[in-house]
Amino acid sequence: MVVNITGNVKDLIDEVYRRSINARSVLRKHIHKTPLVSNRTLSILSGGEVYLKLENMQKTGAFKVRGALYKIHRLLLAQNIKGVVAASSGNHAQGVAYAARCYGIESYIVMPRTASATKINATKSYGAKVVLYGEYYDEAYEKAMMIKEEKGYPFIHPYDDLDVIAGQATIAHEILEELPSVDYILAPIGGGGLLAGIAVVAKKRNSRTKVIGIEPRNAPSMYSLIKHQKRLVEVKPSIADAVVVKNPGKITSEIIRELADDIILVDEDDISHAIAFLLERAKIVVEGAGALPVAAILSGSLNLENARVVAVVSGGNIDPILLSRIIVHEASRDGRVLSIIGEVYDKPGELKKVIEVLARHGLNIVDIRHDRWDPNILPNRAIVEIVLEAKDKESIGRALSELGSRGYVFHTRGDSISRENE
């Protein structure tokens, strides 16, 4: 529970809350009230009662459209604008493009060259003029400032703006109306607009609710600023690309410093696991940033015993190629997809004998690779790597044992291969 908030920060918090109430009525005709669904598996694993706020099912596939719509609404009330400019790695880009189309104005969106093709194409599909520039958001932002001056259009900041924060805050209103007694709300952090907005509403409506921000360890910008009073010199690439920023917002960091109860860091493997978990166990497609709260739960970073918890699944705009790699990575880690490597005589029928053994143990072959040029093998031998799908690890062990009894020495990838000089 936060106490003794004074001065300018209190004024910011009060203003965000006031605008968030207005934003609800403005946004209602343009966006979805997204589902809040319980998840039994996460509840069992955490010892709490876990709910998912599915912003991946929002218009444009992410929460960002809330803040973009409300910001443009407020701009149009104040002046007769013909267009807007924004910089974003993807979700804010789509949100602004969609919002601009709703209000019948132009949008120029600067996206880093590292943005996924899926997000770039989606942004264009909403009618935006997309400019690719720089490697990270900060460089795209500088280019957007140049376009802003050239066109004379207002810039829609992705997070450091009271109207944008107020738009994102409407998520917390929806959560607390359905689950007033929520103990924890977990939300991703990039620049901080989502967490700041949620924290304002949560603390105003139920001061006992704890608000926790989740960041990737590869880009802990808000964590570094709040915990150590330091700004990051550089960030590393992350699966959660939508939250990779070097400099979090000034407004958002002030609000988060006052209202957030903690910030948790998660590793890339945690994020990958969370994406695969949600796909397989909850039938939910999420992007890296959207998986951050679930990654924190699955990694055991928080004690949620007997607590009511809402994890904000902030977006689902994941690149299909990345998703396919994550699926393979997680299946490999679980032992459901793996490689076995061994030597066979390089003559007709030998590989067929190996394949017959694998088939008897229910192993499906995904790929086969030969190497006849390794100088460590004899001229009449070949190294064979076979990529397999397995239902369980035991079937692999039985297959390797039978292969061994038939004179074939195979090992799973990573183990050394003993070579016979025959």
Image (cartoon, grey):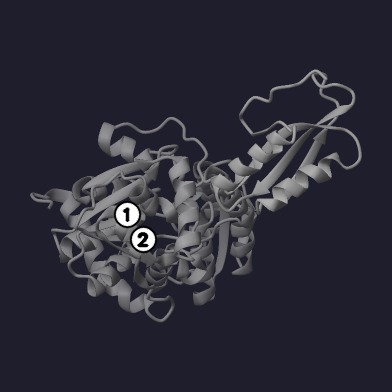
Question: x and y percent of residue 250 in the render?
Answer: 32, 45
Most distant residue in the front direction: 405
Question: How many numbered marks does the figure carry?
Answer: 2
Q: Real-space Cα distance between discs 2 and 1?
A: 6 Å
Q: Which residue lies furthest to the bottom in this view?
A: 29
Asked if labels 1 and 2 touch by Cβ distance under 8 angstroms, the answer is yes
Note whether residue 209 is visible: yes
State left or right for residue 226 relative to residue 247. Answer: left
Element under label 1?
helix
Residue at the spot 27% in from the left edge and 46% down from the top edge:
302
What x and y, as percent, mark residue 283?
A: 49, 66
Residue found 43% across the figure and 62% down from its top: 64
Q: Residue 55 carries which label?
A: none
**Closer-to-camera residue (390/370):** 390
Q: Percent x, y for residue 32?
A: 42, 76
Q: Residues within 10 Å of mark 2 (few under 14, many from 20)?
A: some
- Kind of residue sitting beneath label 2: Thr
Q: Which amino acid does label 1 sit on?
A: Leu
Q: Can residue 164 be seen in this view?
A: no
User: What residue occupies the far left of the structure in this picture?
Assistant: 4
Location of the C terminus by quadrant is top right
Q: How many C-alpha atoms fall within 10 Å of the one at disc 1: few (<14), some, or many (≥20)?
A: some
Q: Which of 311 and 115 is in front in this view?
A: 311
In the displayed structure, would residue 337 be above or below residue 383? below
Q: Which residue, given by chain and number where applicable, does mark 1 sit on?
A: 45
Task: Identify the residue shown where x is 77% and y is 42%.
Answer: 354
Tell me: 305 left or right of 279. left
Residue 41: which numbered mark, if any?
Answer: 2
